[in-house]
Image (tube, rainbow, N blue to C red):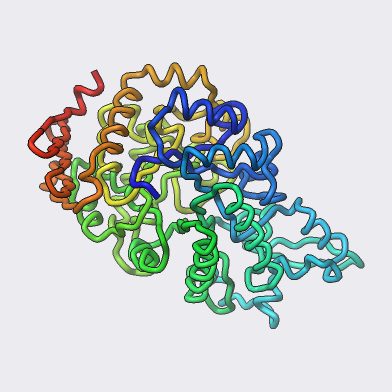
Amino acid sequence: MKNNVQLITYIDRLTGSDTQTLNNILNDQLTDLFSGIHLLPFYYPIDGSDAGFDPIDHTQVDSRLGNWNDIKALGQEHELMADLIVNHMSAKSKEFKDVLANGNNSPYWDLFLTKDKIFPNGLSEQQRKKIYRPRPGSCFTNFALPNNESEDFWTTFTDNQIDIDITSEMGKEYLTRILKKFSENNIKMIRLDAAGYAFKKAGTSCFMLDETFEFIDELSKAANDLGIETLVEIHSYFQTQIEIAKRVDRVYDFALPPLVLHSIFSRDFTALTRWLKISPKNCITVLDTHDGIGIIDVGPMNGKPGLLDNSEIDNLVEKIHLNSAGESKKATGAAASNVDLYQVNCTYYDALGQNDFDYLVARAIQFFSPGTPQVYYAGLLAEKNAMELLLKTNVGRDINRPYLDSTIIDKALNKPFTKAMVSLIQLRNNCDAFNGEFTVNSDFSALEMKWEKDEHSATLVVDLANRSAKIRITESNDMRIVCLNTLLN
């Protein structure tokens, strides 16, 4: 993977159309900005109950977006990342429908995970309390079967997302078949979606067990053998992320987004600096994604201190709600469906009160942080909260999943912020210093992040007390300074 800025996008929500249109936009309006593209689920169907993360057929491109040849063509000019949804598939899939019709006589029975497979002697209350679930309520759903029978199936996320038995031969074959389809169509990296929940074991949390690491290791090796890198997607305690990073190709730096917000809100870089000195270097950095702004990644867990304490986290969340004029409250927690316990649903731009300077500073910090930066399509264009879409769907995360098109993109690219953002992306892509050594220092409201390689260096200096930020680039004997305030004018 090239160490350049990448784009995260849905095909249809950015283009208003299909894969070929996305290719045109990347070669026209967004030309030479992104070396790689994380294509959010493009499988059939893209408009299920979880925006494509509940595939009926994981190996089929939704025909509204095109076909595998279109994906393959897109991958000829950009490194493509796709989601391998390892934990579950749709209840509307032909496989699960066959299970509902034929019970344990179905040839697909072993593909899915039932409660009895993990708890053959029954689930005690003590065992139930140990199970970690990212949403409130039970992780099982009872489905009717033939002959007046029924069965409790694992549904870690929603009752339309049936968990796969990854230990069964059929489960292994299912995942292998998807990997092969990816390798045949220019997919160079996979994001292991919800991998932390894939392995279940009685008497445990059923989350990030030793066996989960073994599963990730095996799946990563299978992917690597096909020329595919793996990115593990896990929201968890920060120390867990550090340990996971030692065992996989790449992880997300999910602690970065809330820490950047905390730093700007409090005008104190102490917590962020502490994290950047110990954070994994083999990471993908983000500020926003198709999900909300994670909180669990910086918080305490099981009596162990977090990167922020509970009071700081409460202040962070309340400030987001305040900056977004209460819109984030309408999309978070019990206020909307897709209820999550660990994130706030809001655009990053609105979380910062639509302040262009603060948002550009946040992006500069991201680009200077260790790892390869990815920029979400809505964040690239500084899109505001999609309240009309939220009211229409009542899906909390839709507040940051707008439907755009070429005309909207043209208008957005003419905004002062977006022009500054493009300049920042080009700077990050073209400076060789980012392939060197990283250092970071701070003094409360002042931050310095520096990259050095041979005679090349890039230094970001931010002072929130006087609202200034500049980048100093040195290449051989040439030195230039880029002021973020100037970029916005």
Residue found farthest to the left? 477
In this figure, what is the number of numbered marks?
0
Residue found farthest to the bottom? 121
Residue 156, quarter of the rendered image: bottom right
Residue found farthest to the right? 147
Q: Which of 466 and 15 is in front in this view?
A: 15
Q: Position of residue 134 (x, y in %)?
A: 52, 57
Q: Is residue 362 above or below residue 126?
A: above
Q: In this view, does 49 lie above or below 159?
A: above
Position of residue 91 in the picture relative to residue 224 (left or right): right
Question: Which residue is found at the position 24% from the left and 61% from the top?
Answer: 278
Q: Where is residue 24 in the image (x, y as percent from the top left)?
A: 53, 26
Question: Which residue is found at the position 45% from the left and 53% from the top?
Answer: 342
Position of residue 409 in the picture relative to residue 281 (left or right): right
Position of residue 120 in the picture relative to residue 402 (left or right): right
Position of residue 377 in the picture relative to residue 104 (left or right): left
Q: Position of residue 462 (x, y in %)?
A: 16, 37
Residue 344, quarter of the rendered image: top left
Q: Which of 224 and 63 is in front in this view?
A: 224
Q: In this view, does 357 lie above or below 114?
A: above
Q: Nearer the viewer, residue 343 or 227?
A: 227
Q: In which quarter of the image is the C terminus?
A: top left
Question: Which residue is found at the position 54% from the left and 30% from the top?
Answer: 22
Residue 68, quarter of the rendered image: top right
Question: Which residue is found at the position 50% from the left and 51% from the top?
Answer: 188
Q: Position of residue 145 (x, y in %)?
A: 85, 64
